[in-house]
Image (cartoon, helix red, strand yellow):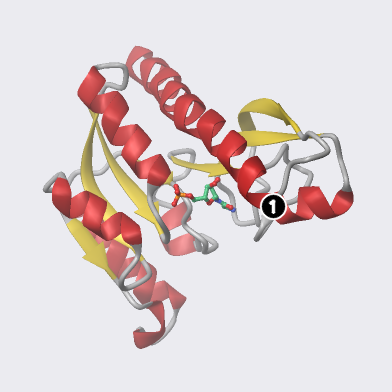
């Protein structure tokens, strides 16, 4: 079984989907840690409900990004974290975490990358009036949503779709796809 840390900044619906897949036995992993960078984020309560170790950091109280990430690295190492799963973590990962976890940090993004990277990918797709958007799972590198793509799934945009409708469709795909992709990565890892 692989030890993971989930990094999140928001509501935590993807965090919940990961926990559900673990409980149902379709994802063979253990969430050793939740890392959150926003005091009061909904995901913190979800972790508490499941009695998952949680650290909440306010990055600006650290001297710099390296110091912030060094604290997180220590938290991950002491808990034997093997993979880092970003689930709505709205921050770039710097070299302090990237180097020790190279090829072991994964992100989910609500668009078909390379289209619509960065914030509000759903709003960007609606503004661009595209008919198809989707979900991407990718390895993390030092860019903004630029690492090697592991899997993608398209979501059709209907004329009547507003931001909430599209978010609902995209998140339904995310909640199924993310645990599946993580599981397939872990199977490959265990075969190494
Ligand atoms: C998800 O839709 C995820 O794809 C997106 O944040 C949302 C978090 O929702 N991530 C990004 O935009 C990363 N660039 P959640 O907190 O309910 O899981």
Q: Is residue 18 above or below residue 120?
A: above
For the residue pair 73 and 88, the one nearer the viewer reads as: 88
Q: Is residue 61 left or right of residue 3?
A: right
For the residue pair 45 and 1, the one nearer the viewer reads as: 45
Q: Position of residue 136 (x, y in %)?
A: 63, 35
Asked if residue 94 shows in the view, the reply is: yes
Q: Is residue 67 above or below residue 112?
A: below
| Quadrant containing the N terminus in the rendered view | top left
Q: Is residue 138 left or right of residue 106?
A: right
* Residue drawn at point x = 50 percent, y = 63 percent: 94
For the residue pair 84 and 87, the one nearer the viewer reads as: 87
Most extreme residue toward the left, as rendered? 51
For the residue pair 33 and 161, the one nearer the viewer reads as: 161
Q: Position of residue 70 (x, y in %)?
A: 33, 68
Which quadrant of the structure image shows residue 135? top right
| Quadrant containing the C terminus in the rendered view | top left
Most extreme residue toward the right, as rendered? 129
Q: Position of residue 160 (x, y in %)?
A: 78, 40
Q: Is residue 107 left or right of residue 149?
A: left
Q: Is residue 147 above or below residue 189?
A: below
Q: Which residue is mark 1?
A: 121
Q: Position of residue 92 (x, y in %)?
A: 55, 62
Q: Is residue 62 above or below residue 161?
A: below
Q: Residues within 10 Å of mark 1 (few under 14, many from 20)?
A: many
* Residue drawn at point x = 30 percent, y = 63 percent: 72
Q: Is mark 1 within 8 Å of ligand 1?
A: yes
Secondary-structure class at tag 1: helix
Asked if residue 52 shows in the view, the reply is: no
């Amino acid at each position: 079984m692989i030890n993971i840390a989930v990094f999140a900044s928001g509501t935590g619906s993807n965090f919940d989907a990961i926990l559900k897949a673990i409980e149902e036995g379709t994802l063979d992993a253990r969430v050793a840690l939740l890392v959150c960078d926003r005091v009061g984020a909904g995901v913190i309560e979800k972790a508490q409900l499941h009695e998952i170790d949680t650290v909440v950091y306010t990055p600006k109280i650290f001297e710099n990004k390296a110091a912030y990430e060094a604290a997180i690295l220590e938290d991950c190492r002491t808990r034997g974290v093997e993979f880092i799963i970003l689930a709505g973590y709205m921050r770039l990962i710097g070299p302090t975490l990237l180097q020790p976890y190279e090829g072991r940090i994964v992100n989910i993004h609500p668009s078909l990358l390379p289209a619509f990277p960065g914030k509000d990918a759903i709003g960007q797709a609606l503004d661009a009036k595209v008919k198809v958007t989707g979900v991407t799972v990718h390895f993390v590198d030092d860019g903004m949503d630029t690492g090697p793509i592991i899997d993608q799934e398209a979501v059709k945009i209907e004329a009547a779709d507003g931001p909430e409708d599209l978010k609902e469709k995209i998140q339904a795909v995310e909640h199924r796809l993310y645990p599946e992709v993580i599981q397939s990565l872990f199977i490959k890892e265990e075969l190494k």
